[in-house]
């Protein structure tokens, strides 16, 4: 049985959804997000990577340099991280879990999103939709560059 659900911020519902899905992942986490600066999410990503989950992250090249950004730190911890090098923003916010579930929405992976902003996340358990997102992720992965 498929379960689709939505979460909203401010509050910890969106944050908890992200963390729960990271913890539940078994094999793959493909993440395409504008930025990551919430250390609670960063810590869970490192733990998933350390337990053998294949984690790949794509982020925006300009946001990587923001104060508090965890993108370089994740790369230094050994996670495969790439950034787009276009003159425009890579503004996606999605995560594919084990090639079968998609988390997406307006929610930025920041503390401000949990504490103050009006944002949302939708989780969709659908293999066909997950494969569409996988295709977009792989296309971006091929065009983005490793952090130098």
Image (cartoon, rainbow, N blue to C red):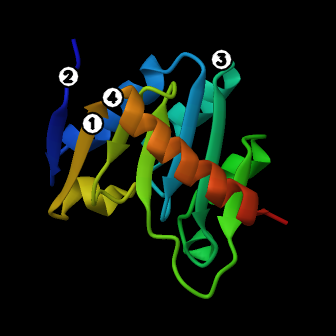
Tell me the distance, in whole angstroms, between the alpha carbons under discs 3 and 4. 25 Å
Measuring from the top left, give residue 96's x and y in whole percent: 47, 37
Q: Earlier in the sequence, mark 4 or mark 2?
A: 2
3 or 2: mark nearer the eye: 2
4 or 2: mark nearer the eye: 4
User: How many discs appear?
Assistant: 4
Q: Residues within 10 Å of mark 2 (few under 14, many from 20)?
A: few
Tell me the distance, in whole angstroms, between the alpha carbons under discs 1 and 3. 23 Å
On residue 123, the disc is 1
Q: Residues within 10 Å of mark 1 (few under 14, many from 20)?
A: many
Measuring from the top left, give residue 130's x and y in whole percent: 43, 36
Residue receiving disc 2:
3
Residue receiving disc 3:
51
4 or 1: mark nearer the eye: 4
Q: Residue furthest top?
A: 1
Tell me the distance, in whole angstroms, between the alpha carbons under discs 1 and 2. 8 Å
Tell me the distance, in whole angstroms, between the alpha carbons under discs 4 and 2. 9 Å
**Which residue is painted at 35% across and 41% down in the image?**
103
3 or 4: mark nearer the eye: 4
Q: Image height check: is 12 above or below 85?
A: above
Q: Residues within 10 Å of mark 3 (few under 14, many from 20)?
A: few
Residue nearest the viewer, comparing 76 with 54: 54
Q: Earlier in the sequence, mark 1 or mark 2?
A: 2
Tags 1 and 2 in contact by the CB under 8 Å rule? yes
**Which residue is painted at 51% across and 28% down in the image?**
99
- Badge 2 marks a residue whose secondary structure is loop
């Amino acid at each position: 049985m498929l379960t689709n659900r939505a979460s909203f911020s401010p509050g910890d519902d969106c944050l908890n959804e992200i963390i729960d899905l990271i913890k539940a992942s078994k094999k793959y986490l493909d993440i395409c997000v504008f930025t990551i600066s919430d250390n609670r999410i960063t810590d869970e990503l490192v733990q998933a990577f350390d337990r053998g989950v294949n984690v790949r992250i794509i982020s925006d090249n300009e946001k990587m340099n923001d104060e508090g950004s965890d993108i370089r730190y994740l790369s230094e911890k050994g996670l495969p991280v790439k950034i787009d090098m276009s003159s425009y923003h890579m503004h996606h916010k999605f995560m594919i879990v084990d090639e079968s579930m998609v988390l997406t929405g307006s929610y930025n992976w920041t503390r401000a999103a949990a504490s103050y902003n009006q944002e949302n996340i939708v989780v969709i358990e659908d293999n066909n939709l997950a494969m569409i997102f996988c295709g977009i992720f792989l296309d971006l992965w091929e065009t983005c560059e490793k952090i130098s």
